[in-house]
Image (tube, coloured by chain):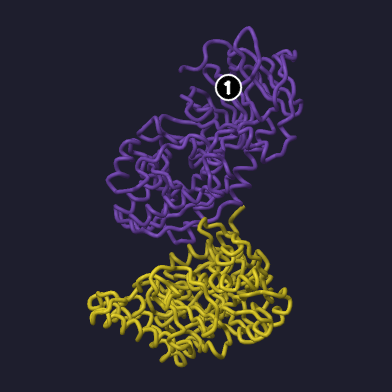
């Protein structure tokens, strides 16, 4: 590859550090950029008032070690408007959004693409585990990482197709252990930095507490009724922000069988509980789909649909609607189709695109689904595990 | 800095070759301790005292009034904390101008922690601290700190007029001349101040070497104690190579001052005319006040400074944002805020500062690059949906 001018997004973690460092080592003209996203407040895990400072320092040290320039750019406003606020509003609305996809869409592959242009760079690089591949038909394809356990293509499903051809994902072919080995070999101090598990802006994992602090004590935090599928009251819930569809733990309710959250109705302030088999749905309807293809697939196309991060995927038939939304019908019903989470479509290794789930297709006691005619019978076992 | 157009001399100005040469000689040949009685020690002492004469001459001080310190921050602390402490029986109140450097705010913070109060002198929209602001200060202020020229805007303050009023009210006056020394003619007696600090690396000397003038009769409690170096005013073995370098840089700056400041002023006018031609809505801060000949602080409306620095760096221009915080947050500079510059304009401020290495060609190329960067940032910002 000829020498490229690369803008490398650096979060302060080992993955993006190695991605940037490998490109620099290959002789590319790398400029590191760390987005300053937010002050996360004072929690035990982030004693500094502005905990991105540590991440910024780590990224800067990597850049110094590899002798390339590094900049910090303030993206707090975009982060708040496009990622944080929709996420907390979603919870108050009974939907569990996946903020990492919005962050990739609006920050790393949105804001940073514009910065790439103003830095006169040719490519944007990140430390995501996924691959950008030139397809036989000349189009660009986003593929799963070689290291299936680390694959992050799900989180990239909302990035614009037009950016793919200008994106470098140097870790797509590497295993995590290899990435750490590169970090060690290159003398990067982050080589043994632990994985981050929780959402970066809720480092203590207390989502409900964070949402309550952000929204105030009223919306989504008022206690209400747990009901069963027929609407009978089972008990009191602590406020809908504490629950997500498919949740079993922390319900604080005694029942004969194990109960799961089936649905959340923000308007009625109720949380519907029921047995596991009632979680299963024959399909889903999405919001507008972001296709990582030059054109949407034909109606009736087959794909595997992943309905949350780490989901193994379910075989389904896709029915794109003229308004850009889509209906997917599973071959076998799937448990916990959660409004707000992403549905991401795959054809083998290739990620075709994705969209937030608007609602599940009909099932017992579910109110939101539009049921266009017949659908696969709801029964049988949960999707092949 | 081979290809870079370096317009950040207010941050630090490259060390002059004559200074490098003198410091190399000092490192090689002046190995003894200047406090030692033997002839080797005396040789080093002679070099330190020669540098004291050179540095004192730059600011019209007597050599005996000069205390070598590590730079501006230490000098500000020694004058303000040491000066206030020495007068503690009389008063526990200090004052400074709103636009002072962080180092002055830091020294005031030390005193505050020890029970002192402080008052702040207002700043006018022009960037000047009006002399009659001294009348607003409460009685009993022991030390008033005033900067000679502001580091961000370059606005030269009416220190002599302010100091005369302050001294008439019984205050001791400290002048932070770090940005002014070596750039404008400077005479400590004419200014009528009790303390004055300057720092070598702002005018071609090394980092880590500066001097505080303590005029005869000015009260001072030393902060570093131990051995009686600097006549007991600052303990610790002298930074001999740094002091030698400071001396040479001071002598060169004093000798060339008139010609160099006229040259820089012509460059500044050329640069500002170029900016106004290329970017007609540019706002030069402090343009109505007397300014350092080398400093231009300009806002390009709609082009936020963090984006500008990235775009300028990519185009080979080194400049500074108002006063970037370590976290990279785009906070309006307190100096511009004190001048009443609206926030949306203040977050677009970039400081360009010239020095000996800056020529007409660099200025012209910088104007072209800045215009390009402004267009790139504005179109990128415009694209934010």
Left or right: residue A61 compared with residue B190: left
One can see residue A121 in this view: yes
Tell me: residue B132, above or below residue A42. below
One can see residue A377 in this view: no
Q: How many marks?
A: 1
Q: Which chain is yellow?
A: B
Tell me: residue B218, above or below residue A144. below
Tell me: residue A382, above or below residue A268. above
Looking at the rendering, which quadrant does residue A137 occupy?
top left
Q: Position of residue B22 (x, y in %)?
A: 29, 81
Question: What is the drawing colour of chain A?
Answer: purple
- According to the picture, the residue beneath numbered tag 1 turns out to be A336
Q: Residue at x 47, y 78 (%)?
A: B212
Q: Position of residue A88 (x, y in %)?
A: 65, 38
Q: Residue at x 59, y 43 (%)?
A: A83
> The N terminus of chain B lies in which quarter of the figure?
bottom left
Nearest the viewer among A149 and B244 is B244
Q: Chain of mark 1?
A: A
Nearest the viewer among B12 and B78 is B78
Judging from the image, what secondary structure is the residue with disc 1 in?
loop
Looking at the rendering, which quadrant does residue A280 occupy?
top right
Looking at the rendering, which quadrant does residue B362 occupy?
bottom left
Circle 1 residues within 10 Å: few <14, some 14–19, many ≥20: many
């Amino acid at each position: 590859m000829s020498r490229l001018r690369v803008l490398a997004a650096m979060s302060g973690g080992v993955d993006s550090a190695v991605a940037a460092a490998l490109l620099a080592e290959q002789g590319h003209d790398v400029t590191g950029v760390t987005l300053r996203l937010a002050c996360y407040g004072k929690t035990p895990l982030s004693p500094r008032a502005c905990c991105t400072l540590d991440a910024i320092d780590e990224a800067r040290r990597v850049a110094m070690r590899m002798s390339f320039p590094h900049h910090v750019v303030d993206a707090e406003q975009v982060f708040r408007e496009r990622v944080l606020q929709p996420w907390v509003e979603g919870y108050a609305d009974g939907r569990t959004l996946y903020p990492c996809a919005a962050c990739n869409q609006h920050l790393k592959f949105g804001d940073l693409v514009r910065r790439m242009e103003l830095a006169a760079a040719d490519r944007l690089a990140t430390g995501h585990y996924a691959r950008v591949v030139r397809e036989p038909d000349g189009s660009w394809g986003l593929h799963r990482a070689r290291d299936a356990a680390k694959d992050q293509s799900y989180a990239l499903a909302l990035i614009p197709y037009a950016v793919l051809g200008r994106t470098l994902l140097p870790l797509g072919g590497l295993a995590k252990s290899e990435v750490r080995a590169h970090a060690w070999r290159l003398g990067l101090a982050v080589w043994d930095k632990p994985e981050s598990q929780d959402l970066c802006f809720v480092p203590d994992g207390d989502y409900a507490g964070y949402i309550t602090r952000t929204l105030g004590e009223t919306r989504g935090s008022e206690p209400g009724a747990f009901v069963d599928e027929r609407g009978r009251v089972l008990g009191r819930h602590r406020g809908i922000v504490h629950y997500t569809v498919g949740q079993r733990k922390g319900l604080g309710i005694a029942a004969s069988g194990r109960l799961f959250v089936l649905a959340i109705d923000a308007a009625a302030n109720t949380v519907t509980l029921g047995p596991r088999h009632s979680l299963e749905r024959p399909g889903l309807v999405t919001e507008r789909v972001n296709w990582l293809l030059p054109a949407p697939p034909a109606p009736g196309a087959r794909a595997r649909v992943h309905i949350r991060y780490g989901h193994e995927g379910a075989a389904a038939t896709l029915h794109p609607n003229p308004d850009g939304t889509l209906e997917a019908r599973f071959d076998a019903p799937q448990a916990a189709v959660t409004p707000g989470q992403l549905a991401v479509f795959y054809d083998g290794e290739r990620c075709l695109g994705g969209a937030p789930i608007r609602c599940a297709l009909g099932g017992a006691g579910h109110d939101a689904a539009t049921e266009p005619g017949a659908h696969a019978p709801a029964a049988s076992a949960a999707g092949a595990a | 800095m081979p290809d870079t157009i370096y317009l950040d001399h207010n941050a630090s100005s490259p060390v002059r070759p004559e200074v490098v040469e003198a410091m190399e000689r000092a490192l090689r040949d002046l190995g003894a301790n200047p406090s030692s009685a033997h002839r080797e020690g005396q040789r080093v002492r002679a070099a330190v005292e020669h540098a004291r004469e050179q540095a004192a001459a730059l600011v019209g001080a007597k050599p005996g009034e000069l205390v070598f310190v590590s730079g501006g921050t230490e000098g500000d602390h020694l004058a303000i904390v040491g000066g206030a402490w020495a007068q503690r029986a009389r008063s526990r109140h200090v004052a400074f101008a709103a636009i002072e450097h962080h180092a002055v705010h830091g020294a005031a913070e030390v005193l505050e922690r020890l029970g002192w109060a402080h008052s702040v002198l207002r700043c006018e929209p022009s960037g000047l601290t009006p002399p009659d602001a001294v009348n607003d200060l409460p009685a009993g202020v022991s030390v008033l700190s005033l900067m000679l020229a502001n580091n961000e805007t370059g606005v030269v303050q009416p220190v002599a007029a302010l100091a005369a009023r302050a001294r008439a009210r019984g205050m001791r006056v400290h002048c932070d001349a770090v940005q002014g020394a070596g750039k404008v003619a400077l005479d400590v007696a004419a200014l009528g101040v009790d303390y004055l600090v300057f720092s070598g690396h702002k005018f071609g000397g090394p980092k880590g070497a500066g001097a505080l003038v303590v005029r005869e009769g000015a009260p001072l409690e030393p902060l570093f104690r131990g051995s009686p170096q600097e006549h007991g005013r600052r303990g610790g073995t002298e930074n001999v190579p740094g002091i030698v370098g400071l001396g040479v840089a001071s002598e060169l700056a004093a000798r060339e001052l008139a010609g160099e400041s006229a040259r820089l002023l012509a460059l500044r006018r050329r640069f500002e005319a170029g900016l106004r031609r290329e970017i007609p809505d540019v706002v030069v801060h402090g343009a109505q006040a007397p300014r350092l000949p080398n400093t231009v602080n300009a806002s390009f409306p709609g082009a936020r400074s963090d984006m500008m620095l990235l775009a300028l760096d990519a185009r080979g221009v080194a400049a500074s944002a108002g006063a970037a915080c370590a976290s990279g947050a785009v906070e309006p500079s307190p100096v511009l805020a004190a001048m009443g510059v609206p926030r949306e304009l203040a977050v677009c401020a970039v400081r360009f500062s010239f020095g000996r290495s800056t020529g007409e060609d660099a200025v012209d190329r910088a104007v072209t690059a800045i215009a390009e960067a402004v267009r790139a940032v504005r179109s990128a910002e415009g694209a934010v949906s």
